[in-house]
Amino acid sequence: MKESAPFMPRLFLACLVAACAAVALLAPARAEPQFPPGLRIGLEPPGDLKPSTRFTGFEDFDRKVAISILDLPAGAYAELERTANAKNSPGLAGVKRENFSFRDGTGLLLTGLAKGKDLTLHKWILLAAAADKDLTALVNVEVPEAALTVYSDAVIRKALASVTFRPAPIQEQLGMLPFKVAQPAGFRVMKVFPPSGLILTDGPTNDLSKQAYAIVTIGRGAPEQSDDRARFARDLLSQAPLRDIEPQSADAMRIGGNPGFEIRARANGLMGEPVMVAQWLRFRGGSYLRVVGVGRKDDWDALFTRLRALRDGIELR
């Protein structure tokens, strides 16, 4: 009996641990939000909704149910909110507006009906923002009348309540581009715009008025004739987010084994600061790869060498 006394607390503790483990096994696992490729916005898709191959979001193809998601800059929120609060919502009947809480904050939820000749769609539109992530989320849900037995209002609201944000998945987004930056030349990827381009910068912040940067994009509609490429290059440079652009030189050249064109210029930057600019176009068929580098005049020579290394290190997929 003297030896059994200390054994009882140990036996009780062992039983308690076993009971807790059993409860943990029986408790339903918390579902994790799914994020469409490259997107900062995700949710827990209900029912048979799967990632869509036709748009950014999720769909139940057989039941014609869709959740589309737009990842927009924070500055887009004010205009979208004004539109959402307008008295008339074209194409939407029986509109109701309400504040709606979700996993990462509170947004504005619109519900209503969109009626066509052969189909009535129940719609839920969630507008939300995350200022600390420079992000506006627009989530649009469409459920046909016949699918309400699976995707009821309660089910959709639960899905919208699971909306969550994540940091920009830079590596995932880079993989979605039709080119690879094999030699960044010391530049840091600041923002990616799948599937067309990215911004790189040469400093610790994202303030492009205070540090050098490069914009790399790919586009279509390039001229096939060499005589038209100089005009095409000048027209593109005039659309850059700069002011008072004064070209200093313009030359045809070979870039990465393809026909190319270079323009060097002086300009004023985003805040009126004087800058130097280089734009390179690399033509291939009816498409083009464009690199624009911008930096201060006082360290332009060294920066220009790095920009050329960045340009030459871009590989088309």
Image (cartoon, rainbow, N blue to C red):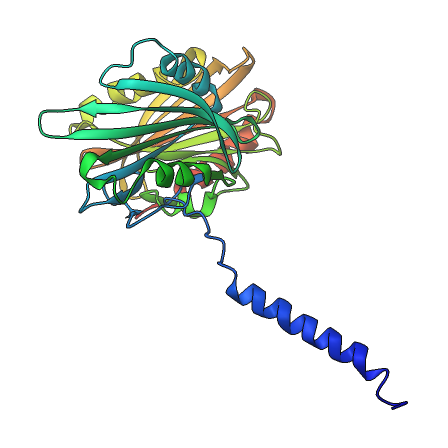
Residue 172, compared with residue 280, is above or below; it is below
Is residue 183 something that shows in the picture? no
x%, y% of residue 269?
51, 15
From the viewer's perspective, tell me whether residue 18 is left or right of residue 266: right
- Residue 203 percent across, percent down from the top left: 60, 33
Point 18% across, 39% down: residue: 146
119 versus 228 height, above or below:
below
Q: Nearer the viewer, residue 315 or 44?
A: 44
Image mark count: 0
The residue sitting at 57% across, 65% down in the picture is 23
Q: Going by the picture, which residue comes out furthest to the front?
A: 1
Q: Please provide percent x and percent y for residue 55.
A: 26, 38
Residue 38 image position (x, y, % from top left)? 40, 42
Q: Nearer the viewer, residue 85 or 284?
A: 85
Name the residue located 22 percent from the left edge and 41 percent from the top edge.
147
**Is residue 29 at all visible to an observer of this figure?**
yes
On the rendered image, what quadrant is the N terminus found in? bottom right
Outermost right residue: 2
Return the residue nearer the eye: 233 or 33: 33
User: In the picture shown, does residue 74 fall above or below 3?
Assistant: above
Picture quadrant of residue 6: bottom right
